């Protein structure tokens, strides 16, 4: 699943550490999400979306197949 976390984070000049602290995960988790090596749980996706003031669908791009 692709996501726009890095794009949104850079637009707002937010560090990976700051986002990780805000949503209760490690910086490594944010790195893995941004690199597409880890899919967020629904709970984490919700926290990230809320942090950016967006809907989950605006950040996480689901592709069938």
Image: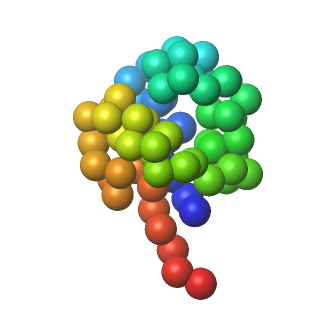
Q: Quadrant of the N terminus?
A: bottom right
Q: Relative to 35, is 13 above or below? A: above
Colouring style: rainbow
| Percent coordinates x, y for residue 64 in the rendering | 52, 80
| Percent coordinates x, y for residue 10 in the rendering | 48, 29
Q: How many marks?
A: 0
Q: Quadrant of the C terminus?
A: bottom right
Q: In this view, does 47 lie to the left or right of 53?
A: right
For the point 54% across and 16% down, the residue is 21
Residue at the extreme front? 43
For the point 63% across and 44% down, the residue is 33
For the point 53% across and 38% down, the residue is 6
Q: Is residue 33 left or right of residue 14?
A: right
Q: Relative to 61, is 35 above or below? A: above
Quarter-wise, where is residue 57 in the image?
Answer: bottom left
Q: Relative to 58, is 19 above or below? A: above
Residue at the extreme bottom? 65
Relative to the observer, which residue lies in front, 56 or 24? 24
Quarter-wise, where is residue 50 in the image?
Answer: top left
For the point 73% across and 29% down, the residue is 28
Is any part of residue 14 visible from this angle?
Answer: no
Is any part of residue 40 visible from this angle?
Answer: yes
């Amino acid at each position: 699943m692709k996501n726009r976390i890095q794009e949104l984070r850079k637009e707002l000049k937010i560090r990976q550490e700051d986002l990780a602290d805000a949503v209760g995960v490690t910086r490594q988790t944010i790195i893995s999400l941004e690199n597409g090596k880890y899919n967020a749980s629904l709970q984490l996706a919700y926290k990230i979306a809320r942090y950016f003031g967006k809907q989950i669908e605006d950040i996480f791009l689901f592709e069938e197949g």
